[in-house]
Amino acid sequence: MTPTHAIRVAATTVLPIVLSIGSATALANGERLYFEVSNDLSPSQPTAVVTLWTEFDPADYCFGATLTEVRATDGLWIAPELDPSMIAPGTHPGDVSADGLRVEGIIAGQYHLPYHIYGDPTNPIALWRAEITIADFTSREIGLSTLTSRYDVYPDRMSRTGRSALADLTEASTTIVIVPSPGALIGFATLLVVPLGRRR
């Protein structure tokens, strides 16, 4: 088998889409998705970089593939991209929804075909990233979450096919804090303090 043929088979093995929804209940040594956020949002930093990572059961060899969606309760997603290790034929960084609150159809995965190409066993491993931005700096929090319909791992180094671990997966969930401008905070404090002073 030539290396070119090996890549073609690996892509077919790792990345076909399965349209089933599994449980998000994690086992003790299960898998999880989680976010890393570069910074809070404020007038001086209106944009943050959000990276999606996965950590898998250390009993398995490596991450295989996932089909997921990233959601925000506010803001606008910009420039979604896969981590370089997750770029392969059949993968996709996802499409931003019309309202800007979701990145849909994210397909991240890596090649793994024993004797030809071995997946990266790094654990945890980065999958995807995008920027999120806002224009309204009212003090609040933005919720981030994932909705995953496929999650596969390779049980050992010589596995030729992946194993679904969707039933063991914990979805990613976090918040981003919106820090208003100092002027807005001073104005809010004045509203609280002045009425108290008038009572004296």
Image: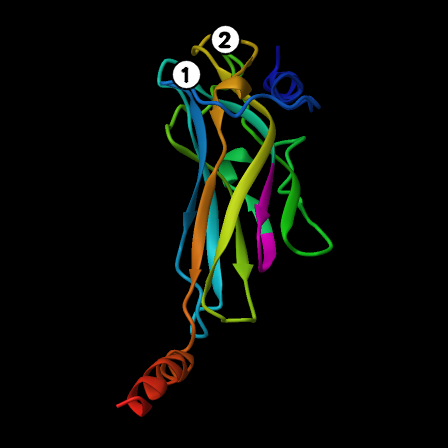
**Coordinates of residue 89 in the picture (x, y in percent):** 66, 31
Q: Nearer the viewer, residue 56 or 30?
A: 30
**Coordinates of residue 25 in the picture (x, y in percent):** 48, 23
Residue 61 numbered tag: 1
> Of all residues shown, which one is farthest toward the left?
200
Q: Is mark 2 on a helix, strand or loop?
A: loop
**Coordinates of residue 52 in the picture (x, y in percent):** 48, 41
Residue 159 numbered tag: 2
Discs 1, 2 touching: Cβ within 8 Å:
yes
Q: Which of 99 and 108 is in front in this view?
A: 99
Colouring scheme applied when the structure was drawn: rainbow
What is the span of residues highlighted in magenta in the rendered image? 69-79
From the viewer's perspective, tell me whether residue 101 is left or right of residue 131.
Answer: right
Going by the numbered disc 2, the residue's amino acid type is Ser
Which residue is drawn at the image coordinates 45% and 68% (left, top)? 139
Considering only order in the chain, which callout, 2 or 1, is on the residue closer to the N terminus?
Answer: 1
Q: Nearer the viewer, residue 13 or 95?
A: 95
From the viewer's perspective, tell me whether residue 192 is left or right of residue 85.
Answer: left
Which residue is drawn at the image coordinates 44% and 46% (left, top)? 174
Going by the numbered disc 1, the residue's amino acid type is Tyr
**Coordinates of residue 119 in the picture (x, y in percent):** 47, 22
